[in-house]
Image (cartoon, grey):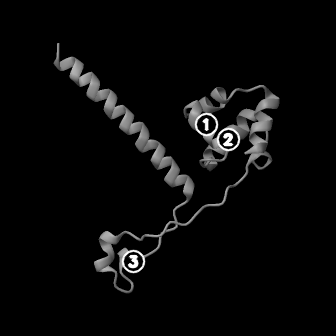
Amino acid sequence: MEKLRNLRKQRGYSQEKLAGIIATDPSNYSRKERGEIRIYDDEWEKLAAALDVPVEEIKEEKPTGVVHNDNSTFSDHANSGNFYNQQFNIPDSVIENLQDYIKVLKEQIEALKKENKTLRSK
């Protein structure tokens, strides 16, 4: 997202500052600014307001991909018109965001396990 990055730098804002504006962590914001994960419309609006420009001046779209439901678990039920044999259009950004969220949750689970073990040993 070249327009966003350039304007942020022109205005002298850090990624940390803009991350705070859209209520995300700096590493997630960095991925958004690089175009690796999606910036949602409400986030574009907050960023444009913070940078004092119209959304159209900074907003750039990234094409989304298609995910096919080829899960062999359901292949026995794959009759014509069956729910399990449909294709789903899921944007890459949604999948990436969910994968990021899963990673964070796994890290939190491990931290809680360690805390639990420490508390039990007292």
Crowd around label 1: few <14 · some 14–19 · many ≥20 (10 Å) = many
Asked whether the residues under the numbered discs 2 and 1 touch, taking CB atoms below 8 Å apart as contact, a structural biologist would say yes
Circle nearer the N terminus (1, 3):
1
The answer, for residue 54, to whether it is visible in the render is no
Q: Quadrant of residue 31?
A: top right
Residue at (75%, 38%) from the top-left corner?
5
Crowd around label 3: few <14 · some 14–19 · many ≥20 (10 Å) = some
The answer, for residue 58, to whether it is visible in the render is yes
Q: Position of residue 48 (x, y in %)?
A: 73, 40
Residue at (71%, 33%) from the top-left corner?
50
Residue placed most toward the observer, 38 or 46: 38
Q: Position of residue 35 (x, y in %)?
A: 66, 47
Q: Which residue is mark 2?
A: 33
Residue placed most toward the observer, 59 or 62: 62
Residue at (36%, 38%) from the top-left corner?
106
Residue type (three-letter) at the residue carrying disc 3 = Asn
Residue type (three-letter) at the residue carrying disc 2 = Glu
Residue at (30%, 69%) from the top-left corner?
73
Q: Which residue is mark 3?
A: 85
* 82 over 11 or under it: above or below: below
Q: Which residue is mark 1?
A: 29
Circle nearer the N terminus (2, 3):
2
Q: Position of residue 79 (x, y in %)?
A: 34, 85
Calculate the distance from the C-alpha at mark 2 to the C-alpha at mark 1: 6 Å
